[in-house]
Amino acid sequence: MTQHEHAATGCGLSQCDAILCYLTGCIGQWVPMPDLARISGGYAVHSRIADLRKRGHRIEWMQERRAGTRKVWSYYRLEAHE
């Protein structure tokens, strides 16, 4: 089911809408990718962020490498409207 088909069912927020809602509540703050995956119910967060950007939302992305590990942490934040 596509995002548009899901939204048309009225069964709740799409993954994009859930992410946007969460980012709006944390406006200006960096939000870890696992938090967005949890609230959206899926791990295609970067794809959903791309969809939101296509809708005109300005969302920044940052990566952080933790010292002593090979792990890379991704964070997103919604830019405040002026």
Image: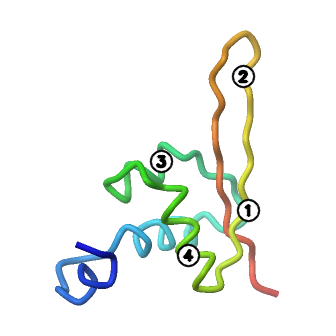
User: Could you tell me residue 36's position as x and y percent?
Assistant: 47, 53
Determine the secondary structure under disc 4. Answer: helix
| Gap in angstroms between the C-alphas marked 2 and 1 | 20 Å
| Gap in angstroms between the C-alphas marked 4 and 2 | 28 Å
Residue receiving disc 4: 52
In the displayed structure, would residue 53 be above or below residue 67?
below
**Crowdedness near tag 3: few (<14), some (14–19) or many (≥20) residues, C-alpha within 10 Å:** some
| Gap in angstroms between the C-alphas marked 4 and 1 | 11 Å
Q: Quadrant of residue 6?
A: bottom left
Name the amino acid, label 4.
Leu
Q: First in sequence, mark 2 or 1: give its number.
A: 1
User: Could you tell me residue 80's position as x and y percent?
Assistant: 74, 77
Determine the secondary structure under disc 1. Answer: strand
Q: Quadrant of residue 73?
A: top right
Name the amino acid, label 3.
Asp
Instruction: State the residue at coordinates (33%, 74%).
Output: 14
Q: Quadrant of residue 57?
A: bottom right
Name the amino acid, label 2.
Arg
| Gap in angstroms between the C-alphas marked 3 and 2 | 18 Å
Residue receiving disc 2: 66
In this picture, residue 9 sits left or right of residue 14: left
Residue receiving disc 3: 35
Q: First in sequence, mark 3 or 2: give its number.
A: 3
In the displayed structure, would residue 4 be above or below residue 64?
below
| Gap in angstroms between the C-alphas marked 4 and 3 | 17 Å
